[in-house]
Image (cartoon, helix red, strand yellow):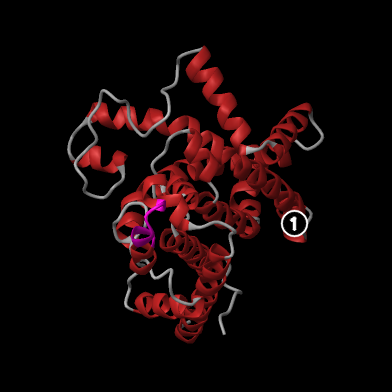
Amino acid sequence: MLHYLIRRFFLLCFLMAGISLVVFLLSHAVPSDPVVANLSERNLDDAEMVAAFRAKWGLDQPLYKQYLRYLKNLLHGDLGISIRTQRPVLEDLIRYFPATVELALFGMFFAVFFGMIFGVISAVKRGSLTEQVLRGMSIFGVSVPSYWLALILLYVFYLTLGIAPGPGRISTRITAPDHITGFFLLDSLLQGKGRLFADSLRHLILPGMCLGMFTTGLISRTTRSSLLETFGQDYIRTAQAKGLSRQRILVKHALGNALLPVVTIIGMGFSNLLSGMVLVETIFAWPGIGQYAFQSAQNLDFPAIVGVSLLIALNHVVINLAIDLLYGVLDPRVRYR
């Protein structure tokens, strides 16, 4: 296990270096000028102002020198200064990432809860009308674009019915909690603010449902397929021949052995929720990494764009490693080399 972790750590270092190079080159290959995106028209007419801006952000240097300087700073934990916010990128990521994690966790809870239930029911009631309905819901969840679903949810539940709060993490009439962890639900509980907790939870429902629909469909379909495959194994038929109840066979023998592919889907789904919510966060005015990335791209904020990309890549790598380690817990036959 130790040798496996050491090898994965070194692979992680090479992978992050490669990703930083690719993202750095791609962000600078965009046919736009950050000077034009960040300076006013009046300042653009001032040659000294333009030259000072380029010199300040290193844009007057050759591209390879810009990358080598960035890589040197990266090795010291410095992601650079955001052109848009004028703050260290690392500070911005720490500020915005908790909102994204909180939303992703809620969406993942929604996906796992309903995905597992729908998948188990579909497998147990194979061929029934209930299964057909649940399979249709799963296909809908996988097929519908998240941005379209976000707009529909806001229109129906917020604008038309008025039973859900509008965009944002909390209502405008409520003050945000003091920053402790950055998670509004947890911070409001730690500070004993029940009203703030309830309001934060209500604001999580619509974007969480929107983000969780796709993963719900994947988990449901994977759970159903894995359970149906498990039901055909010899040990399941042996358990049935012994007269064990259907419920006991499902809980004690089938479900545990069908979890491995489901765990993979859950892990990858959570990783995707952490990285693929730019449009949803923008529509719901959610102050997370997705909205930060969108605003950075609008302003050609190179340090912020590369910083967000590295964070997303790190999320994928760490979650993949966690899934691999969890395999050994769920299946004793798995060995690490």
User: In the image, is residue 261 above or below residue 214?
Assistant: below
**Label 1 secondary element:** helix
Magenta segment main secondary structure:
helix
> In front: 277, or 164?
277
For residue 51: magenta? no
- The image quarter in which residue 80 lies: bottom left
Total numbered badges shown on the rendered structure: 1
Residue 160 visible in the displayed image? yes
Identify the residue shown where x is 49% and y is 62%: 309
For the residue pair 289 and 126, the one nearer the viewer reads as: 289
Residue in view at x 17 percent, y 38 percent: 191
Quadrant location of the C terminus in the rendered image: bottom right
Task: Report the residue marked by disc 1.
Answer: 238
Instruction: Read off the magenta span.
Output: 44-50
**Is-magenta flag for residue 49?**
yes
Tell me where residue 259 appears, x and y as whole percent.
61, 56
Q: Position of residue 94 (x, y in %)?
A: 32, 56
Of 10 and 309, the residue lying toward us = 309
| Quarter of the figure with residue 221 | top right
Location of residue 23 by image quarter = bottom right
- Of 152 and 285, the residue lying toward us: 285
In this picture, residue 69 sits left or right of residue 279: left
Vertical order, 308 against 291 (above or below): below
Check disc 1 and give the amino acid type: Thr
Taking the view exactly as shown, the residue that stands out farthest to the right is 127
Question: Is residue 244 something that shows in the picture?
Answer: no
